[in-house]
Amino acid sequence: MPKVLILYYSRTGNTEKMANAVAEGVRSISGLEVELTYRATAEMLHEYDALAVGTPTYHHDTTSDIKKLFEEAAVKKINLKGRVGAAFGSYGWSGEAPKLVLEIMKNRFEMNVIEPPLLIRYTPDQTGLEKCRELGRKISEKIIASKQ
């Protein structure tokens, strides 16, 4: 059964709300397993068919934990080529973090990314949460299409 990892960091709870809605969207398509977590190791990434990273933007950047994870995966030569990648996050001012994560997935790890990243300013409302669920459905559909 294809597996999706939804990894997120959330200090205010906004990106966590988004992550939960993305997971709902993935689960709406049967035949996929979803893990929703705020902590992962570089070695774990290899176990999943898709990786969705939720990160808020702090000081025009992603969080240090997300950076360290990707740096460790690169050093350990974790192969993610062709796997589905997506990024999302909340922001207050600039919103660069999900864009940076998506660039890393696409350019460093050669993942099959869903573009553009999903950005929501501050707290996601019902419209924003529906966009998150739609992102989850897109992730599921892309995995299923890649398996055919």
Image (spheres, rainbow, N blue to C red):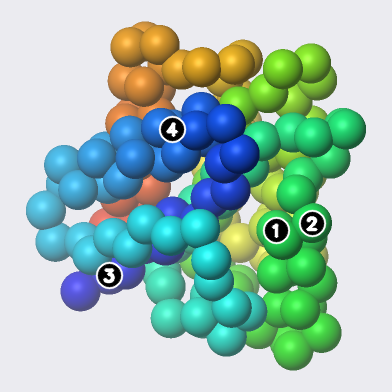
Q: Which circle's residue, 1 or 4, is located before the other in the chain?
A: 4
Label 2 belongs to which residue?
A: 64
State the residue in front, 73 or 20.
Answer: 20
- Do labels 2 and 1 touch, CB within 8 Å? yes
The residue beneath circle 4 is: 18
Q: Nearer the viewer, mark 3 or mark 1?
A: 1
> Which sits in the foreground, 1 or 38?
38
Q: CA distance from mark 2 to mark 3?
A: 29 Å
Instruction: Using the numbered discs, state the Cα–Cα distance from disc 2 to disc 1 in whole angstroms.
Output: 6 Å
Label 3 sits on residue: 2
Question: Tag 3, which secondary structure?
Answer: loop
Q: Earlier in the sequence, mark 4 or mark 3?
A: 3
Quadrant assignment, res 136: top left
Q: Amino acid at mark 1?
A: Ile
Distance between mark 4 and mark 2 Cα atoms:
20 Å
- Residue depicted at 82% across the width and 84% down the height: 75
Residue kind at label 2, given as amino acid type:
Ser
